Image (cartoon, coloured by chain):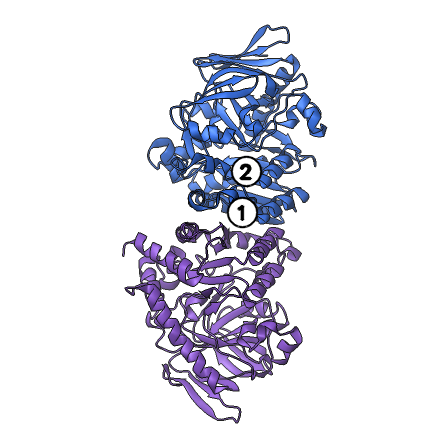
Chain colours: A purple, B blue
Amino acid sequence: MTPDERLERYARLAVEVAVNLQPGQFLRINAEPEHLPLVRAIGRIAYERGARYVETQYRDVHLRRARVQHAPDESLDWSPPWTLALVDHMVETRGATIQITGESEPELLADVDQRRAQRMRPRLATERLLDAENRRLIQWTIVGYPNEGWARAVFGEPDVERLWDAVITATRLDEPDPIAAWHAHLERLQARAATLDERRFDAIHFRGPGTDLHVGLCDRHRWLTAAEVSVDGVPHVVNVPTEEVFTTPDRRRTEGTVRSTFPLAFGGTIVRGLELRLEAGRVVEVRADVGAEAVRAEMATDEGASYIGEVALVDGDSRVRKTGIVFLDTLFDENAACHVAWGQGIPTALDGGEEMTAEELADCGYNESVVHTDFMVGGPDVSVLGVEPGGAEVPIIADDAWLLS
Amino acid sequence: MTPDERLERYARLAVEVAVNLQPGQFLRINAEPEHLPLVRAIGRIAYERGARYVETQYRDVHLRRARVQHAPDESLDWSPPWTLALVDHMVETRGATIQITGESEPELLADVDQRRAQRMRPRLATERLLDAENRRLIQWTIVGYPNEGWARAVFGEPDVERLWDAVITATRLDEPDPIAAWHAHLERLQARAATLDERRFDAIHFRGPGTDLHVGLCDRHRWLTAAEVSVDGVPHVVNVPTEEVFTTPDRRRTEGTVRSTFPLAFGGTIVRGLELRLEAGRVVEVRADVGAEAVRAEMATDEGASYIGEVALVDGDSRVRKTGIVFLDTLFDENAACHVAWGQGIPTALDGGEEMTAEELADCGYNESVVHTDFMVGGPDVSVLGVEPGGAEVPIIADDAWLLS
């Protein structure tokens, strides 16, 4: 593949499979300026497929750094009216959005005031966007774009070609027919979710070095994959790559200790050696070799930010894991290993969840928050067990292999 | 100057002199992705000066190309609600805006349907922005950023350093104290405007090869410079560089023929060898060696698009002219030579114009349009004469020298 062919193929995967843009739809792209070549390829393909309008909303970590250093404190969580108008238009017209990751400067905010850095998010706009995703009103996806800064963070040198090779492996772009390969892969994940659904586990138990964590499940939980269908019936894939099956926990019944198995890049900093202790669902202790402050600051965003909103299972057969690379990007790393997320839960992972009232959701232990940060807890040394309502434990993953059938 | 010092100095000129951002203000930057280094420098300096929020709105000619080729015809002049919300916020909060030019691909739309290309503008948002500028509700400016594509268009090779040298000369960045040099320069231009105001000319007469044009002036006209003051009393400079004094004509009294003395880059195409014939103020004939179609298409935008809205005088002493370069960018080229513009007039160039009703403006021959395209008509071979109410002609510029005193 020439670089042009590679970019074309990747952009087609994003537009045609991942977000599955329909003729006449509005498309929003959220990207860094460093992602420009992919933005242009996606935009061109979108218009060729009949997009009505394509808007790119650029986020710039350099401007964020200047802002967090100087802007008035009370302005940091402000949602600009134009950002709200963009989200509202996307929701009202049943549009689609592609977020591009692969942060060009994943540590640019590491040395700033973490309380201010974590406060700096357009809260109302984020709530509306998350709500629209949860209610399946829009098609959405996330893809990564290899760039120099990201490659430098991963390899210590800007070896973009090596990063592209890893991304190609992770996203099955090396298959003769990547689109067919994707459909087959999603079916395999959906079969895993169906098996888990049949088991009706009461909790998931992670056991490994530094980790002994029970994640309680509501009896109405269901296991999902990244293969989604919008309320208008448009199938799409919300993460590319994806290797996970996941559900939303009963936030009151997560207990124990957990040690992160991967570094975690978020909010302009990289957290290493993260360890959490949870009591009655709440994170009561945060420790880390580096970056604990950023985690504590994010967990202070709202009440739900220190409760668990997602549990996800990934085995060693993952294409992402097979690259052998720590991507320092959650889109990729969370698909290399089992993970849990603090912050917002997933209403569609509860039977009838989309139609539930806030009270009914709370009855299921659903967790409400404006943040949602996945961190990796799985790996070769971590066993995953399903806990039956009577207390018996059934192996799901051991020695990196998927065992449940 | 190192490249970093140069960028810093240029960004400071843009923020501190050109747009003169005040603490607590909102700043909008409009730029191409290729202008990223200047965007970041401006954004940082703006936050350091106390900006409340900085938003960058990127325009991308590659996405525009895909859109003009594929999007529904009736969508092309649509103003996205988020663009309107951004303009409205800027106006309501008395914000500021910096537009960055130096198009990276000035001919990328040359081969598309010019009717569709010219139709493709957010009409309502453009009207609101022009109205806010005309009513001096916001501080605004335009600056150029040297980039490879622009340099390639100018020199036939991506010699960005040579383009920087020319931009430094044109913008007085080579002065020991550029800010003091700017203030002195603006005073000199303001003195020219005052001299012209005293003369109360009835018309301006351009005479040269292919040009014999009378531009009528209303008796309430006044001559302006790019040194503006907002309604809140904040001085700013709406173009950097600027070398012109200008006013708004009586649109009914422009007569004759005019030959453009520079190529004209606009809307993704370059027009060369442009010649216009005007009768009773209206352009009745458009000829060009290349690009006449784009001009005709823009002039079909609305009724005022084929009338003249501005006349501006620049002599050979201009810093821009002295670079000896055709920049293929109106911000620079219009400051190398006398020019006129088809499209929207300038209400502030009429005595009491800001408070006039539409009817009073029409009585002065003010021209209303959503477009405003300057083209260069002056040069060493073109004389400029002021026509007195009695018909006598007074030399203003001859042999490239300013004569009026």
| Residue B288 picture location, percent across and down | 41, 23
Residue at figure coordinates x 36%, y 77% from the top left: A316
**From the viewer's perspective, is residue B33 above or below residue A349?**
above
Say which element carries label 1. strand
Q: In the picture provided, is A161 more to the left or to the right than A129?
A: left
Residue at figure coordinates x 47%, y 28% from the top left: B296
Say which element carries label 2. helix
Residue at figure coordinates x 58%, y 35% from the top left: B17
Q: How crowded is mark 1: few (under 14 residues within 10 Å), some or many (20 or more)?
A: many
Q: Which residue is disc 1 drawn over? A: B56
Quarter assignment of residue B222: top right
Q: Which chain carries label 1?
A: B
Looking at the rendered image, the disc whose residue lies closer to the viewer, 1 or 2, is 1
Residue kind at label 1, given as amino acid type:
Thr
Q: Mark 2 lies on which chain?
A: B
Picture quarter with the N terminus of chain B? top left
Per the model, the C-alpha gap separating discs 1 and 2 is 15 Å
| Residue B239 picture location, percent across and down | 55, 32
